[in-house]
């Protein structure tokens, strides 16, 4: 047993650099996948087991390991998502991009015991596969396995707090505390589900607002989503560009047409001015815009740096000041 421990630690010492290079590659690859798929992630964090942790793991498992290759979590990455459906999206991506060790992977979300909520992350054991394994730069670690844990930010918070209590097993937890854990687990699971419902409703609402603009039906209440739709609408953009064209002014958009932090200011001004719907706002903007446009022309040469938000925000700003 002691001999196995020494041999495994020796193997670890000689391959640690390869694990570190593997970790760098996997972290960069996963981040790139998330960006390409537009999946918002709270955190991607990797680590390599240190020698002491590895030794303790081998001892805890009664020296059952005979080789370093049998230990699949030396290189580990944790992905923390905002929404529970993203866990499955990421899992599918990982299955497509890497070789999955099904026997050593576990989906702890399928537990029936609500007090196990702190352990419900999805644990995948993977290694490089396909074209990635064939790359020359990956040759030294193409056979090394790594673990990826995927969980939501609420699941992660639960696990961290539960871990801080220091209980090693269910039997360690007093019965009354176990019941409280169970109640909390249910609340956190409900919160995860509710955030998913909010996300779904927001998407449906955005689609309804966009359809309303297409049908020229704009009796839509003012909020950040309806303002964003207005700023992207043909009627708004065409009105601005026609006014600029009449004076031979070129519009230049620095880094895109939007500056999102201004949308909140627009919503706030609308509330202060008593403007309730997009129809009211667009009508007020088009009637008031010429009053301020001539002043802007005097300050500019032949071009005008702007975002879509700028003209509307300027009009509302001046209207708000004039009513005080």
Image (cartoon, rainbow, N blue to C red):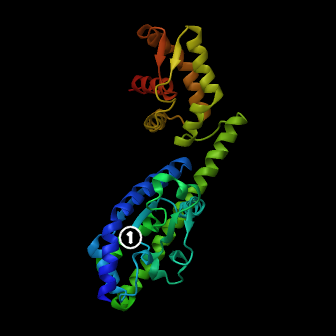
**Residue at 40% of width from left, 59% of height from top?**
23
Q: Position of residue 93 (x, y in %)?
A: 58, 59
Query: Which of these two is toward me, 105 or 285?
Result: 105
Q: Determine whether 17 is above or below 219 in the image.
A: below
Front-most of residues 6 and 111: 6
Disc 1: which residue:
74
Residue 217 can be seen in this image: no
Q: Crowding at label 1, few (<14), some or many (≥20) Cα neighbours within 10 Å?
A: many
Task: Pick the residue in front: 277 or 89.
Answer: 89
Please provide percent x and percent y for residue 26: 45, 57
Vertical placement of residue 234 versus 67, above or below: above
Query: Quadrant of residue 55 in the image?
Result: bottom left
Q: Is residue 64 visible?
A: yes
Is 132 left, or right, of 80 in this rendering? right
Q: Is residue 322 left or right of residue 37?
A: left
Q: Residue furthest left?
A: 52
Residue at 58 percent across and 63 percent down: it is 95
Q: Position of residue 255 (x, y in %)?
A: 47, 29
Residue 21 is drawn in which quadrant? bottom left
- State which quarter of the image contains the C terminus: top left
| Position of the N terminus by quadrant | bottom left
**Residue 160 as seen in the image, left or right of residue 212:** left
Residue 64 at x, y percent in the picture? 40, 87
Dot 1 lies on which element? loop
**Residue 318 in the image: above or below residue 179:** above
- Vertical relation: 250 (above or below) 258: above
């Amino acid at each position: 047993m002691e001999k196995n421990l020494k041999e495994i630690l020796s193997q670890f010492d000689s391959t640690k650099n390869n694990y570190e290079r593997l970790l760098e590659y996997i972290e960069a690859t996963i981040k790139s996948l998330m960006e390409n798929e537009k999946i918002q992630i709270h955190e991607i964090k990797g680590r390599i087991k240190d020698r002491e942790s590895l030794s303790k793991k081998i001892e805890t498992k009664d020296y059952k390991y005979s080789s370093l290759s049998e230990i699949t979590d030396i290189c580990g990455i944790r992905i923390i998502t905002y929404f529970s459906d993203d866990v499955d999206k990421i899992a599918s991506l990982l299955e497509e991009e890497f070789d999955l060790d099904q026997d050593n992977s576990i989906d702890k979300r399928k537990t029936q015991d609500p007090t196990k909520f702190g352990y419900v992350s999805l644990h995948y054991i993977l290694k490089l596969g396909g074209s990635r394994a064939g790359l020359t730069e990956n040759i030294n670690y193409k056979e090394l396995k790594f673990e990826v844990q995927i969980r939501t930010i609420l699941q992660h918070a639960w696990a961290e707090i539960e871990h801080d209590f220091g209980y090693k097993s269910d039997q360690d937890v007093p019965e009354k505390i176990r019941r409280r854990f169970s109640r909390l687990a249910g609340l956190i699971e409900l919160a995860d589900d509710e955030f998913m419902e909010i996300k779904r409703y927001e998407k449906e609402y955005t689609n309804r607002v966009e359809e309303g603009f297409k049908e020229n039906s704009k009796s839509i209440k003012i909020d950040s989503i309806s303002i964003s739709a207005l700023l992207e609408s043909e009627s708004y953009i065409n009105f601005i560009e026609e006014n600029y064209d009449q004076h031979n002014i070129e519009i230049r958009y620095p880094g895109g047409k939007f500056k999102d932090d201004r949308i909140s200011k627009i919503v706030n001004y609308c509330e202060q001015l008593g403007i309730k719907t997009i129809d009211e706002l667009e009508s007020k903007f088009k009637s008031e815009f010429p009053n301020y446009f001539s002043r802007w022309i005097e300050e500019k040469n032949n071009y005008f740096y702007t975002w879509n938000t700028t003209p509307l925000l300027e009009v509302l700003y001046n209207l708000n000041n004039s009513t005080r």
